[in-house]
Amino acid sequence: SNLSTFKFSTLVVDETVSGAVPVATSETRVCAVKVVNLPVGVKPNHTDFAIKENCYFHLGAMDWEANQIAISHFLKDIWPKHLKSHPQDKLYLAGKSLKKYISGLSKELLKNVTCINKVEDVQSFMRNHGTMIVPVKIAAGLRIKILEGLAYGVPIIASEAACEGIKTNQS
């Protein structure tokens, strides 16, 4: 079989595969078979709600290396600078394996940060915790949470890598 590997994911293609549907454009580079692009749409599923000001959140599995790298970068390089001019702002981190991930961080990196290990209702969480941040630095697949946030009408601040494969008519 033909094996192509890149930093965060592996795609195995053998003679039984006749096509592939990659989630992000970068994944087409490793496909040795016919690639099919299927457009995906987001149907808005929201009513008007007040966006919680001065609050930001990240929702994602913290046992995924891309999220670990992104949040480490955000907590070390972005959040402290932001707090200098917005000391009242709050950041909520939520997701699987969060407790294990934050156990390795210093208390100073977690200033104004609240950690939530389990989210029962994603839509309610997104609507009640302000603006979503998606600071991933490595594109590897499609961030479904961005599509959910768009559907729920949540404001989103995302890196260019996070938006790969997502086309919107707004900037």
Image (cartoon, rainbow, N blue to C red):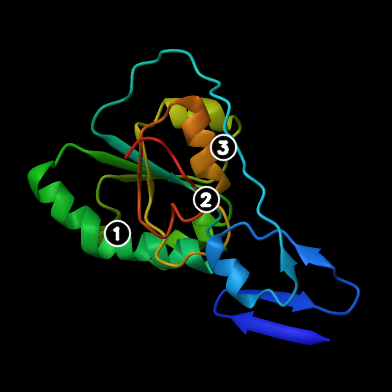
Q: Which residue is mark 3?
A: 119
Q: How dense is the environment of label 1, judged by Cα within 10 Å: few (below 14), some, or many (20 and up)? A: some
Q: Residue 82 at x, y = what percent?
A: 16, 49
For residue 17, which quarter of the picture? Answer: bottom right
Q: Quadrant of the C terminus?
A: top left
Q: How dense is the environment of label 2, judged by Cα within 10 Å: few (below 14), some, or many (20 and up)? A: some
Q: Which residue is mark 1?
A: 75
Left or right of 147 in this view: 12: right
Name which residue type carries label 1.
Leu
Earlier-in-chain disc, 1 versus 3: 1
Front in this rendered view, residue 169 or 79:
169
Earlier-in-chain disc, 2 versus 3: 2
Farthest-out residue, right: 16
- Spatial CA span between label 2 and label 1: 15 Å
Q: Which residue is mark 2?
A: 60
Relative to 32, does residue 151 appear above or below in the rendering? above
Closest to the camera, between mark 2 and mark 3, is: 2
Residue 171 visible, this orientation: yes
Front in this rendered view, residue 76 or 41:
41
Relative to 152, does residue 81 appear above or below in the rendering? below
Q: Are marks 1 and 3 in contact (CB under 8 Å)?
A: no
Front in this rendered view, residue 109 or 76:
76
Element type where label 1 sits in the image: helix
Name which residue type carries label 3.
Val
